[in-house]
Image (cartoon, rainbow, N blue to C red):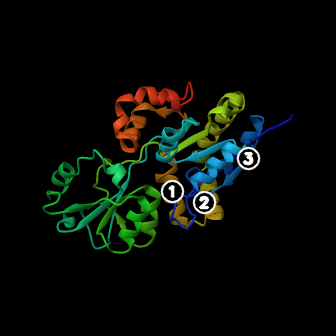
Amino acid sequence: MTLVHLNVMYGHLEGTERKFARDPSGYLSIEAGIYQRHGLEISWNHVQGTEERYRRLESGEAQISFVVGRASLQHFLDTYSTRVLGCVMNSCPYYLVADAAVGELRELKGKTVACREGPARGVPFARVFQEYAGIKLDGEVTLKLPKSDQETFHLLIGGQVAAALLPRPYGFMAEEKGFKRIAAWPDVVDDPLPITIETTAALAKERRDEFRAFFEAHREGVRYINANRNEAIKLLAGKFGHSPALAARTVEEYLVCMDESLAVDFKQFERLLSQVAPEKSSNARQIASEWIVTGALRG
């Protein structure tokens, strides 16, 4: 059987010592022969830098890119040249991670908490701090809003804030450094569509059948990595240098958020749009229909 070749790109989360790929399942899928059974030969390549991935899509060097939703949506709104084929992860709520000296939420009284500005939009922080810790926002706890998750992470580990709301991989890295998660914090901060699957508008039309085969295979691959814990831990340790504890935490608390349907949840898309371009929120349905390929939207 002649196999169709597709070049797939992914990036590491910035500032995590190249320890976190947004979706590492492709490596296991290749090893297990999943793509091959679907008539595909897949190159699964790390390409750091959003602009470089777009360059390779436009030049034809690659056909598919796995990218954080806020970047892919902003690029679409700027150029209208790309399409989202689906989404591997619609939601993955942030963890509240604190200095080891902070035992519980109420001990944040008189201290500063950081959260990236985008995901903080619309979050009822005042109500949450009052309800869960009995402390007042601004009066008794200060909220700092950096521009990036990486900056937020460094504020925490640098001792400039007492606690930070972080995407789970950054939270795991902080825990590796001696910080601890405050489990009482509710799931109110999120980064909608943290893993989108993207291509160009032209390729979405030209290679529709091949992409359909890729999606069937990738769904199987997502199921496979979550059903084979030991293989996933071995992959994370060998390919990305995870410690045993970090690998186990990644499998149990991050990979489980992957959605094997690969569909884009419209409610999460609306949340993302409100963060990236709030002035366009009233046109959410129209933008979704232009950006997301037919059949990939849920809700």
- Given residues 18 and 232, the one toward you in this image is 18
Label 3 packing within 10 angstroms: few (<14), some (14-19), many (20+): few
- Tell me the residue at 20%/67% (across/down): 107
- Tell me the residue at 19%/63% (across/down): 141
- Tell me the residue at 57%/29% (across/down): 293
Q: Which residue is mark 1?
A: 250
2 and 1 marks in contact (CB < 8 Å): yes
x, y percent for residue 32: 72, 46
x, y percent for residue 196: 54, 42
Q: Which residue is mark 2?
A: 236
Label 1 – label 3 distance at C-alpha = 31 Å
Looking at marks 2 and 1 on the same chain, the residue that comes earlier in the sequence is marked by 2
At label 3, the amino acid type is Glu
Dot label at residue 87: none
Residue 21 visible, this angle = yes
Dot label at residue 61: 3
Q: Answer above or below: position of 295 versus 106.
A: above
- Given residues 39 and 271, the one toward you in this image is 271
Q: Quadrant of residue 157?
A: bottom left
